Image (cartoon, grey):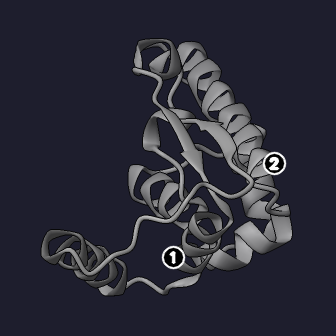
Amino acid sequence: MPKSERAGVDAEIGKLIAEARKRQKVSRDKAAEMLGLSTQMLQKHERGITPITVNRLLQLTEALGIPLSDCLPGAKSRAKKELIVVNTEEQLLVRAYREIPGGGMKSKAVELFQEMAKSGKTGRGRLASPRVFVR
């Protein structure tokens, strides 16, 4: 791929990163802190000046709690949209999950909830104040 095409892809990925970060209502300063980057370096990634590595992109999408496809050009049009309705408690659960540090703690939390669901210990309350998200 010629250098000019790579630069175009880097700029498009950067634009998608910035859009995803803003959708999640995360400031550039906070996102940079979450990644252990300077705000200036994140800005360079978002503007396509400095290409972002795959590892850093994965770290970013996990920190923002978004699918990788949100930051890949063309992936949104190929991705199947799934409609999710959540109530206030579920929103709180998602927010708490996003605050869990890495190191396997998130996967342990998921396993815990999956086990609770299997054993029938979770309650199914009514949907109070539902919100709709498209993922």
Label drawn at residue 31: none
Residue beneath the point at 83% across and 62% down: 28
Q: Earlier in the sequence, mark 1 or mark 2?
A: 2
Residue 47 in percent (x, y) is at 78, 39
User: For the residue carrying disc 1, how many other residues have a C-alpha within 10 Å: few (<14), some (14-19), or many (20+)?
Assistant: some
| Label 1: which secondary element | helix
Taking depth in this image into account, of 135 and 16 the one nearest to the observer is 135
Q: Amino acid at mark 1?
A: Tyr
Q: Are marks 1 and 2 in contact (CB under 8 Å)?
A: no
User: Which quarter of the figure has residue 5?
Assistant: top right
Residue beneath the point at 55% across and 67% down: 63
Q: In this rendering, does residue 27 appear at all?
A: yes
Residue beneath the point at 43% across and 55% down: 58
Residue 61 in percent (x, y) is at 52, 54
Taking depth in this image into account, of 76 and 71 the one nearest to the observer is 76
Q: In this rendering, does residue 49 appear at all?
A: no
Residue beneath the point at 76% across and 43% down: 18
Residue 91 in percent (x, y) is at 64, 64
Residue denoted by label 1:
97
Position of residue 37 relative to residue 83, above or below, is below
Q: Which quarter shows the N terminus?
A: top left
Q: Nearer the viewer, mark 1 or mark 2?
A: 1
Label drawn at residue 22: 2
User: Which quarter of the figure has residue 31?
Assistant: bottom right
Residue found at the far front of this picture: 126
User: For the residue carrying disc 2, how many other residues have a C-alpha within 10 Å: few (<14), some (14-19), or many (20+)?
Assistant: few
Q: Amino acid at mark 2?
A: Lys
Residue 87 in percent (x, y) is at 63, 58
In this rendering, position of residue 123 left or right of residue 37: left
| Label 2: which secondary element | helix
